[in-house]
């Protein structure tokens, strides 16, 4: 029973506390509409996230961008072996706030607040994969003060610290074995942690190679999410096992990967702007998770074995008039999940994102931004092969099938400057 207790908490912490593999990039309305390019684009306070060095090249003294999205995600699962089906339809509400202020001609300061890792997945309770996940609700808010220095008219550098606050609530069954159940419901545990904190840093550079061509580079450090004193609450425990499944707490350190982005923008004319970004994420840092339990149980590990992954982003902007600007783009996003490690708490595979949007400029200071994203994941037939069911002696067990996933996200925001 001690082994079962330890492994159940371990898998819960792994799945819920680090949902970055399911990250959907939504960090600004204008740049999202342009395929989420932005490391070499300067057109609003959103540059505080994409490349803080670009704050020095903004025309206005003060710039503000505020926006939010409705993230509609759905996943369908089918197991041909047992003819089992399941579905999850979820709503997320990522938001962003960016502000910049030009202190003088060569120094600018800014603040970025955004939510890059929040997600929600809810399968039916006691579904076929309930021993891996029933539901997750993850929230993480990033706060990033930045400063930018301009050297001449062609080069700038910027950066600053990143502070993160997060929380998570996660539920799963302890085993697919019906012996460990109560009144037909599998014994499950809910992992809940609040006040999870972390810090890192961001640094960027921007080069104005000519009046038409801009080159940008940005690096975001690895961030370790530190969960301390999270609680585990058990439910539907049969009387025979009640003494073993007492509520407890845990500690865990969870990595979010370092990222490097480089890109180029080309201003073909007064009306046309084109951009390309390449992003490389060091997901390989997420090999496994060590969890320390505060009731004397030994430290446990759970393999994930993620691989480094790249994203290729393309965007275009057309200024139709002084009032109306149209944008479009797409990106190709590689999954960090390797074969045999495909778990339903992060049901994602390689994907392609299609984006679009526009800005309506009400006056010289205020504009309304609209965007949309459709993210299509490749259909995948895969499994998670590393579940150690402690109610059996057969070693590792596998759970898998065919997953179909997609995301649609409309967004709205405002930009203001003077």
Image (tube, grey):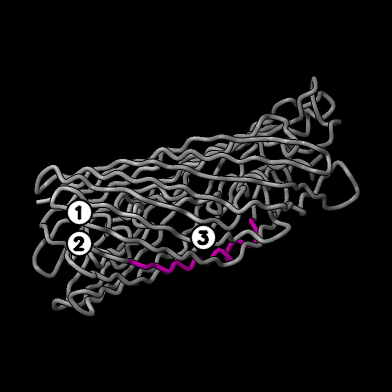
Contact between marks 2 and 1 (CB within 8 A): the answer is: yes
Earlier in the chain: of badge 2 and badge 3, it is 2
Earlier in the chain: of badge 3 and badge 1, it is 1
Q: Is residue 284 magenta?
A: yes
- Image point (76%, 29%), residue name: 186
The answer to whether residue 245 is left or right of residue 249 is: right
Q: Which residue is mark 2?
A: 271
The CA distance from mark 2 to mark 1 is 7 Å
- Image point (60%, 35%), residue name: 88
Asked whether the viewer can see residue 231, the reply is no
> Which residue in the rendered view is the most extreme toward the front?
320
- Marks 2 and 3: which is nearer the front? 2
- Image point (29%, 52%), residue name: 30
**Where's residue 57, x and y in %?**
17, 66
Quadrant for residue 187, please give it: top right
**Where's residue 96, x and y in %?**
32, 46
The CA distance from mark 3 to mark 1 is 30 Å
Q: Which residue is mark 3?
A: 333
Say few, some or many: other residues with alpha carbon within 10 Å of mark 3 (under 14 / 14 to 19 / 20 or more): many
Q: Which residues are magenta?
A: 275-289
Asked whether the viewer can see residue 121, the reply is yes
Quadrant for residue 338, please give it: bottom right
**Where's residue 110, x and y in %?**
22, 56
Say few, some or many: other residues with alpha carbon within 10 Å of mark 1 (under 14 / 14 to 19 / 20 or more): few
Q: Quadrant of the N terminus?
A: top right
Element under disc 2: loop
Earlier in the chain: of badge 2 and badge 1, it is 2
Q: Which residue is mark 1?
A: 320
Q: Is residue 343 magenta?
A: no
């Amino acid at each position: 029973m001690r082994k079962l207790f330890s492994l159940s908490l371990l898998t819960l912490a792994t799945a819920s506390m680090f949902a970055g593999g399911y990250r959907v990039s939504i960090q600004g309305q204008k740049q999202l509409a342009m395929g989420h390019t932005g490391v070499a684009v300067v057109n609003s306070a959103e540059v505080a996230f994409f490349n803080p060095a670009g704050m020095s090249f903004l025309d206005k003294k003060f710039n503000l961008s505020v926006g939010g999205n409705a993230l509609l995600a759905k996943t369908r699962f089918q197991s041909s072996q047992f003819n089992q089906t399941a579905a999850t339809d979820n709503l997320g509400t990522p938001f962003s706030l960016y502000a910049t202020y030009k202190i003088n001609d060569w120094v600018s300061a800014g603040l970025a607040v955004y939510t890059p890792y929040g997600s929600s997945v809810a399968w039916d309770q006691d579904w076929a994969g309930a021993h891996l996940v029933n539901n997750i609700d993850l929230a993480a808010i990033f706060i990033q003060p930045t400063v930018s220095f301009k050297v001449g008219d062609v080069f700038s550098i910027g950066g600053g610290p990143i502070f993160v606050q997060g929380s998570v609530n996660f539920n799963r069954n302890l085993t697919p074995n019906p012996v460990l159940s109560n009144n037909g419901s599998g014994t499950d545990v809910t992992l809940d942690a609040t006040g999870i904190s972390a810090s890192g840093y961001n640094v960027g550079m921007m080069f104005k190679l000519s009046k038409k061509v801009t080159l940008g580079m940005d690096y975001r450090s690895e961030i370790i999410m530190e969960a301390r004193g999270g609680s585990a609450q058990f439910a539907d425990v049969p009387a025979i096992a009640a003494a073993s499944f007492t509520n407890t707490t845990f500690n865990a350190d969870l990595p979010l990967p370092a990222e490097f982005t480089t890109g180029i923008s080309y201003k073909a004319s007064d009306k046309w702007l084109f951009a390309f970004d390449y992003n490389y994420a060091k997901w390989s840092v997420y090999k496994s998770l060590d969890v320390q339990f505060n009731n004397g149980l030994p430290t446990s590990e759970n393999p994930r074995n993620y691989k480094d992954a790249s994203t290729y982003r393309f965007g275009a902007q057309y200024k139709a008039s002084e009032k109306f600007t149209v944008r479009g783009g797409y990106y190709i996003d590689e999954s960090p999940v390797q074969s045999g490690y495909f778990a339903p708490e992060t049901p994602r595979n390689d994907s392609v994102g299609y984006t679009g949007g526009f800005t309506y400029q009400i006056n010289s200071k205020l504009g309304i931004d609209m965007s949309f994203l459709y993210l299509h994941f490749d259909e995948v037939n895969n499994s998670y092969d590393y579940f150690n069911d402690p109610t059996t002696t057969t070693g590792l067990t596998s759970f898998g099938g065919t997953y179909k996933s997609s995301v649609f996200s409309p967004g709205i925001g405002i930009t203001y400057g003077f």
